[in-house]
Image (cartoon, rainbow, N blue to C red):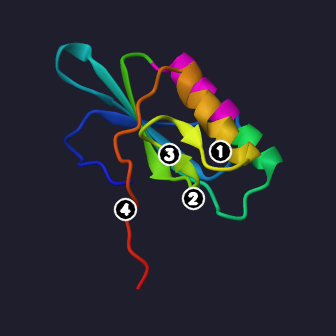
Amino acid sequence: MYVEVCVNSHEIIFESTFNEYVVVDIKGLNNVNLTICSIYRSPNNTVENDIKLSELVNTLCSKSVGHSLILGDFNLNDINWENYSIIGSNRSSELLLNVIRDNYLTQYFDKPTKARG
């Protein structure tokens, strides 16, 4: 993640055992904060690591002051984002959907963001 030098920002590090993330807090006009978190979830992630990912998202949402933006590659293609359901049975997808619902988050991209070549 790159942030322009003139932007009032700093990295935030949470005590988390999930390691594939970076969080930056940006102080905007009128001291309104925007916390941006970029996450990478490996397609080979274990359920145990997905639990750690859920805990990270819960921590981020509970400790952020102002607005939050979470983005990244979660590699869970069995989620139907139109109705927030899982196609089949997948504990990892269930964990992600639960943490999204519990923290009142909204998914904005409901289609794959890259094409396989």
Residue at numbered disc 4: 113
Give amino acid for label 2.
Answer: Asn
Q: Which of marks 3 and 4 is in front?
A: 3
Q: Which of marks 2 and 3 is in front?
A: 3
For label 2, count other residues whose C-alpha is less than 10 Å away and answer few (under 14), some (14-19) or many (20+): some
Q: Which of marks 1 and 2 is in front?
A: 1
Q: Where is residue 106 in the image (x, y as percent from the top left)?
A: 41, 30
Residue at numbered disc 3: 80
| Numbered tag placed on residue 75 in the rendering | 2
In whole angstroms, how far apart are the C-alphas of marks 2 and 3?
A: 13 Å
In whole angstroms, how far apart are the C-alphas of marks 3 and 4?
A: 15 Å
Q: Please name the predominant secondary structure of the magenta segment in the image.
A: helix
Residue at numbered disc 1: 93
For the point 73% across and 58% down, the residue is 45
- Is 61 part of what is drawn in magenta? yes
The residue furthest bottom is: 117
| Residue 70 shows in the view | yes
Give amino acid for label 4.
Answer: Thr
Marks 4 & 2, CB-CB < 8 Å contact: no
Q: Which of marks 1 and 2 is nearer the N terminus?
A: 2
For label 3, count other residues whose C-alpha is less than 10 Å away and answer few (under 14), some (14-19) or many (20+): few
- Provide the secondary structure element on which disc 3 rests: strand
